[in-house]
C-alpha cells in the first residue's frame, strides 16, 4: 500500500514538473514576445521621429518656397514703381495707367500692415509653441515664422505677453515700409496730393505703428523676470 502511494505521488510530482516546465516555458516565451514587442515599439518610435523630422523639413521647404514667392511679388511691385523716372525718363503716372503711384502706394501699405502679419510670414493665428516642441519650432530658418509664437509664450510662464496683438514679421514689414518711404520721397507732390483729401498721416502712421509694435515686442523680450521664468521652467523640466 505504501509503495503504491509513493508511486502515485511520484506520478503527481512528475505531472507537476511537466506543468511547471510548460508554465515556465510559456512565461519565458511571453517575456521574449514582450521584449520583441518593446523593441518593435522602440523601432516604431524611432521611425516616427525620423518621419516627423522629414515632414518638418518638407514643411520648412514648402514654407520657404511660399515665402520666396510672396517676397518675389513684393520685389516685382517695388521694381514697377520705384526709380520709375530714372528707368523710363518720365514721371510715374498718378492713377490713370499701370503701374501708377496710387495703386503702388496702396499695395505697399497692404504689405507693411496686413500681409506682413499673415500666417505665411508671421506664423499661425493660434500659438502651438511649448517647451517640448520649442527646439523644433524655433529651428525655423526665419524668426518671422515664429514671431507671434514668441509674442504670446510668456503667458505660459505667468509673464505678460510681449505684445497684445499680432505683430508683423520683420522681413516683409521692413522691405515694404522702406519701399513705401522711397516711393513717397521720389514723388513728394503725389504723396502730398493723395493725402490732402483726408487725414494725411493715416497710412503712414499705420506703417510706422506696425514697426513700432515689432520693436516694442523685442524690447519687452529683454526682461529679467521673463528670463528667470524661462530658466525656472527648463530647470523644472530637467529635474522631473
Image: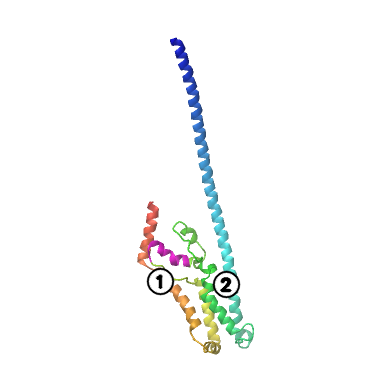
- CA gap between label 2 and label 1 equals 26 Å
Q: Which mark is residue 39?
A: none
Label 1: few (<14), some or many (≥20) within 10 Å?
A: few
Pointer 2 or 1: first along the chain = 2
Residue 134 pos. (x, y %): 46, 59
Task: Say whether marks 2 and 1 touch (CB < 8 Å).
Answer: no
The structure residue drawn at horizontal position 52% and vertical position 76%, both measured from the top left corner, is: 112
Label 2: few (<14), some or many (≥20) within 10 Å?
A: some
Q: Is residue 182 visible?
A: yes
Residue pointed to by mark 1:
219
Report the front residue among 200 and 66: 200
Residue 117 pos. (x, y %): 51, 71
Secondary structure under the numbered disc 1 in the rendered image: helix
Toward which corner of the image does residue 213 lie, by quadrant? bottom left
Residue 236 pos. (x, y %): 37, 55
Q: Is residue 82 visible?
A: no
Counting every numbered tag in the picture gives 2
Toward which corner of the image does residue 88 lie, by quadrant? bottom right
Vertical position of residue 234 compared to residue 202: above or below: above
What residue span does the magenta drawing correspond to? 148-159
- Which residue in the rendered view is the most extreme toward the front? 1
Magenta-colored stretch includes residue 150? yes
The structure residue drawn at horizontal position 41% and vertical position 62%, both measured from the top left corner, is: 156
Prevalent SS, magenta region = helix
Vertical position of residue 115 compared to residue 191: above or below: above
Secondary structure under the numbered disc 2 in the rendered image: helix
153 on left or right of 197:
left
Residue 202 pos. (x, y %): 49, 83
Q: Which mark is residue 71?
A: 2
Amino acid at each position: 500500500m505504501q509503495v503504491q502511494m509513493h508511486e502515485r505521488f511520484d506520478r503527481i510530482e512528475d505531472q507537476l514538473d511537466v506543468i511547471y516546465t510548460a508554465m515556465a516555458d510559456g512565461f519565458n516565451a511571453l517575456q521574449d514576445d514582450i521584449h520583441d514587442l518593446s523593441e518593435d515599439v522602440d523601432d516604431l518610435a524611432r521611425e516616427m521621429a525620423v518621419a516627423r523630422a522629414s515632414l518638418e523639413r518638407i514643411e520648412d521647404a514648402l514654407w520657404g518656397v511660399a515665402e520666396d514667392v510672396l517676397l518675389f511679388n513684393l520685389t516685382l511691385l517695388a521694381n514697377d514703381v520705384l526709380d520709375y523716372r530714372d528707368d523710363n525718363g518720365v514721371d510715374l503716372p498718378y492713377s490713370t495707367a499701370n503701374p501708377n503711384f496710387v495703386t503702388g502706394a496702396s499695395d505697399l501699405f497692404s504689405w507693411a500692415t496686413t500681409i506682413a502679419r499673415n500666417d505665411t510670414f508671421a506664423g499661425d493665428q493660434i500659438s502651438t509653441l511649448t517647451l517640448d516642441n520649442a527646439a523644433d519650432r524655433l529651428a525655423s530658418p526665419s524668426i518671422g515664422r515664429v514671431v507671434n509664437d514668441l509674442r504670446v509664450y510668456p503667458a505660459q510662464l505667468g509673464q505678460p505677453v510681449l505684445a497684445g496683438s499680432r505683430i508683423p514679421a520683420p522681413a516683409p514689414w521692413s522691405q515694404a515700409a522702406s519701399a513705401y518711404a522711397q516711393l513717397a520721397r521720389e514723388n513728394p507732390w503725389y504723396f502730398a496730393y493723395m493725402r490732402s483729401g483726408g487725414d494725411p498721416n493715416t497710412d503712414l502712421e499705420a506703417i510706422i505703428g506696425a514697426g513700432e509694435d515689432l520693436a516694442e515686442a523685442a524690447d519687452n523680450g529683454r526682461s529679467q523676470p521673463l528670463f528667470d521664468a524661462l530658466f525656472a521652467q527648463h530647470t523644472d523640466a530637467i529635474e522631473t
